[in-house]
Image: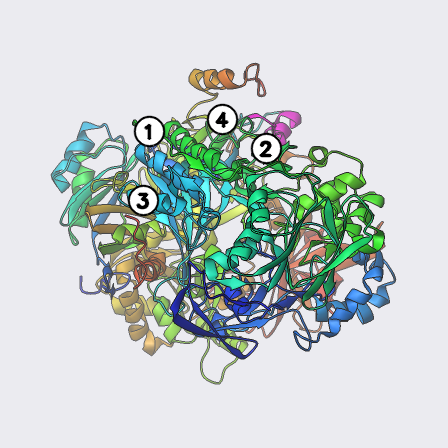
Amino acid sequence: MSTRLASGGRLVNKNKAVSFTFNGKNLRGFEGDTLASALLANDQMLIGRSFKYHRPRGVVASGAEEPNGLVNLGEGAKFEPNQRVTTTELYEGLTAKSQNHWPSLEFDVGAINTHLSRFLPAGFYYKMFIHPRPLWKHVYEPIIRHSAGLGKAPKDRDEDTYEHYHASFDVVVVGGGIAGLAAALSAGQSGARVMLVEQTNDWGGRANVDTPTVDGKPAAEWINATLQVLENMENVTLRLRTQGSGVYDHGYVLAYERLTDHAPETEGPRHRLWRIRTKQIVTATGAIERPLSFAGNDIPGVLLAAAVRDYAVNFGVSIGDRTVVVTNNDDAYRTGITLKKAGLEVPAIIDARTNPQGELIDEARALGIRIEVGRGIAKVKGGKRVTSVEMCNQAGEGAVVEEIACDCVAMSGGWSPVVHLWSHCGGKLNWDDAQAMFRPDPERPPLGADGEGFVKTAGVANGHLFTAEVIADGFAAGRAVAKAAGHSAKIGQAPAGHDAHEGAISPVWLMPQGASHALRSKAWLDYQNDVKVSDVQLAAQEGYESVEHAKRYTTIGMATDQGKLSNINGLATLAKSLNADIPNVGTTTFRPPYTPISLSSIAGAAKGDLFQPIRKTPMSDWHTENGADYEPVGQWRRPYAYVRDGETVHDAVNREVVNTREKLGLLDASTLGKLVVKGPDAGKFLNMMYTNMMATLPIGKCRYGLMCSENGFLSDDGVVARIDEDTWLCHTTTGGAERIHAWMEDWLQCEWWDWKVYVANVTEQLAQVAVVGPNARKLLEKLGGMDVSKETLPFMQWADGKLGGFDARVYRISFSGELSYEIAVPASQGRAFWDALLAAGEEFGVMPYGTEALHIMRAEKGFIMIGDETDGTIIPQDLNLQWALSKKKEDYLGKRAQERSHMTDPNRWKLVGLETTDGSVIPDGAYAIAEGDNANGQRNTQGRVTSTYYSPTLKKGIAMGLVHNGPDRMGEVIEFYKVDGTTVAATIVDQVFYDKEGAKNNV
Amino acid sequence: MLTLHCPNCGVDADETDLHAEGEAHLKRYGPGSSDDEFHDYLFQRQNPKGVHFERWKHVFGCGKYFHAARCTATLEVFGTYSAQTLEPTQAIKDAISAKRPGWSWGDIS
Amino acid sequence: MSNAVSTLQGKVAAGEVTVREGGLRGMITLRGDLASSKLKSVCKSLTGFAIPDMGKAASKGDKGIAWMSPDELLVLVPQGETASALEKIAKAMKGQHYLAENVSDARTHIIVEGSFAREVIAKLAPVDLHPTALRPGDFRRSRLGQVAAAFWMTDADTFRVICFRSVGDYAFKLLSVSAAKGGEVGYF
């Protein structure tokens, strides 16, 4: 059984017990435990089930690389699935539940899959799902739905907060082991601004467990002394629980800081995503131990050798009473030695090599540990827990030499440098045959903005496995990157490291080397996704020769651990199957983040109210307080209608239209874009921007204008007012203000930079209200201060003045066909002005109206709306707006394009009005059907609806649409498809439905 | 995530403060141009793997446009320069030649 | 006039770092040739400051001037004096090519002050806020979260932030959330 030892446990405080629950069971651990060590201390070896076969799974590692130990963590608003037990620090009250099993962890129905595994080989899903469609609906979908996915989706909104943090450094060092510390030390001493991050809560990395010496003293002493030096350096920032997650172009680094995961009741953000810009990066990210591929290597109790001694040394936890070590290298002997010294039994160290030599081997032998050389494990026996191993000759096919009883297997297939961050941005790798590992090629680093390498790798991550090299490499890397970042103050000598001399590794990709198919189909490569040696071999056999294809076919390396344990073993297996060299097969692509980071940390503050900016006008509060049903227009929220008690939204819209037509309506038009264009060349410039003539517009007058892109397509419209000799004010659509401002600046800065024109966006300086309806003038006259009579302020003119005490600019323009004024006041006075209009307008039946009433009234008048009648493919000619295209001007943006053959094609659909024969409303976007079918067997079309409404004024459905030869077909009835497949008949009519002669505005 | 130096306000701007504005040094063709000229102006782009000239706008910063010369394959930046020019400055061309001897881009080399 | 109110009507989020709306201020967008002697002298007479260098701002009390771009300044004048300042500009710049627009109401003005004010800004803007990189006197246009903003420091612990009026509420909330208890990063 796994249990807490009397001795050991450098990270745990045995005087401080911590209670937690696992699957509802009350358990106790110590302060400083991870959830993994605390579970193991309670003999909870079985933690979850694998994805495909629902095999029993226990922890196999002790760090971020863990593929098996995933749990549903927390409850309610703090619930999160797929949390790794090895990186979850224990806290009082932690609740964890195992996942991916039904009905229980101990007894799982899905485990039947393991017995069907021979029918569920690599590519099973691909092969199966090409079969008949009905099976999808009735068999695959329901089954997959039930069994797919790890963990549970959270049901409650996450109550924690998250944030980003932007910081700039000369040097970022990722990894707080001795190489990282040495790099930070030398870079810091050089004078560079340095950040050192470590993903765990413990500086020093493996040196804490494997205890080499530095400068003749135990590593721990050097680590502490170095930390003190670094902490006293103002130019160095140290962060624990912070993972260097990704390296991106131009020295952009994401670091993921977990602030309160270990203490959820603490105030402040839970995670902080550091968005770093740095000149140079050192990745001192260490290495990950590789499993060995033997049958039964996935049974709970089989762990990586280093993990076994991590649990013993760091947490005082033994995985088992009797541990068999199986290895192809010297390092794993440390596990045997550590356990033996802790008083545990080590029945054997099984070494695949025939003649291993080294200090550690001598030490193990001296401790009386039995060492079996040239041996391997044929098979691990056990179900939910290891019971024994069957030893065989590594060179053979798996004939059992001896069965050795044990409850833990510590395996080591060698070490793979963590090259992820080096590779994220293009750093290349070399295969080191002697050490059986991919290591960074310093000649081919990721390149920065200056074309030079901006990442260096140091220590074990650089392929140096021994302390002397590791620490020297880290120190040198720190100095080199500081220099590259422009800092080269004199610094001291690199510390001298030392550890036991080790002999050479002998690569072992399959154990035993001639393992039968039966054994190979139980030799796991990817524990979480259930990929075995036999699956990769099958993929190779079926032609998936590219490592990227084999990965996707077998799903190796596609689990939440992204193949940290499986990738190298998988591609070595693939290489062997293809009779190719490992470097020729290559690795799959390393993509950030290094381990999964919370989605919330990526969102940062952008959640809830702050998910995206909502733009508000000075009158927004009033709208909200008065029943506004909002619609988004860009980032603005505009009232669609003001809904009163007992009304539907539709009722409200109809009421607002009728009231405006009969009495008086108010529209908050503040969102309309307002651009001031000023300068000696402003007229010439606006002549280019608009299709019609703006230079000749008299001062005091307004003109409706169209803007096109260089493709000739309509892009915006609005009323332009001439303010003075060299100043125009251009109104844009609500969504167009920033876009058209940018469009103008583009031409002024990049094409006609010698033209004397300045543009300013004053949209938000002004609150604008449309006062609309037969009583509009009465209201303004009541407010007083300005002459707004027909004579003084006729249609399409503007005037400045004081209106009811407000600084006002009054435009007499109309988008509804009614007598209408649009009045701009400074935004700070906007709300007061709105209130004054409402109060004064009461006797005239004033009522605010929303955007839907606006839309209906403009459609009743046949006015186009950018975004309804236009969709980026419509030219003014399509909308019968030829009158707005100046024939006098030699040039305007879009003019040349409108001469292209497709634009002058007489067969282009053109705008008409449409009236259903039964008075109903045609569905929006409906297509008019024509005779016959097209080449794809679809019905031919001859037009489509662009705007469609119920008109409360006319009490029937009205629409506008683009119809083939439409203007020549007045009175003709055509059919439109409805959503349900039936059709509705509509008569082609003039697009102006209401007050054709314009009598209502002519007052 | 690029960082580009804005020559207008002197800031080394983060890509999120910038807006890419397409290929640089397009010559506008208007009324009177041939169909081919106009087509190429609207649609024909270099799209190179390697040395490229682009327009960028410091949209969250000073609001000004500038030109950038960079390598689309490695993201190396050879330099940024004024938007008010019809072709890259000699200094920019020299900087590119130092790193990519023999480069050319459209009619520019 | 009494009808005029600022975007957030002086809202305050107090804490170790306090975020508060600065209220109405007179602001003028002034575009023109920054080398023009007429422009220089009118700026000086309105604010008491010379036109700042690229990326800089000078301010004291209600008056100030900030470099916005190679042809644009932001002129700060006391609330209520904007109209007269515009008249003075118009008079001084008569016959010159320039643009001056009142943007006092187009902006929301927020003050962020307290021990970790730098960090509050650094959470939201992709800018190096290290004390060696951004000092009082520097003026920076960038973004806060998803909206455009400009900020400058009036002393070591105080930032003045301006953004568009329509997103004043968003910016205020964003700054308050970033300044909330427990949010100190401990970096600067």
Q: Amino acid at mark 2?
A: Lys
- Image mark 4: chain: A
**Position of the N terminus of chain A by quadrant:** bottom right
Residue A670 picture location, percent across and down: 37, 59
Residue A440 picture location, percent across and down: 56, 34
A662 vs C26, nearest the viewer: C26
What range of the chain is rendered magenta? B34-51
Q: Secondary structure at mark 1?
A: loop
B10, above or below A57, in the image:
above
- Image mark 3: chain: A
Residue labelled with disc 2: A428
Q: Earlier in the sequence, mark 4 or mark 1?
A: 4
Q: Residue furthest bottom?
A: A646
A30, above or below A747, in the image:
below
Residue B29 picture location, percent across and down: 56, 27
Q: Earlier in the sequence, mark 3 or mark 4?
A: 3
Asked whether disc 4 touches disc 1, contact meaning CB atoms under 8 Å apart, the reply is: no
A764 vs B57, nearest the viewer: B57
User: For residue A136: magenta?
Assistant: no
Nearer the viewer's eye, disc 3 or disc 1?
3
Residue labelled with disc 4: A451
User: For residue B37: magenta?
Assistant: yes
Residue labelled with disc 1: A487
Task: Report how far apart the C-alphas of labels 2 and 4 lie in the structure.
Answer: 15 Å
Task: Report how far apart the C-alphas of labels 3 and 1 lie in the structure.
Answer: 24 Å
**Position of the C terminus of chain A by quadrant:** bottom left
On the image, which quarter does residue C67 sit in? Answer: top left
Q: Amino acid at mark 4?
A: Gly
Q: Earlier in the sequence, mark 2 or mark 1?
A: 2
Residue labelled with disc 3: A225
Q: Amino acid at mark 1?
A: His
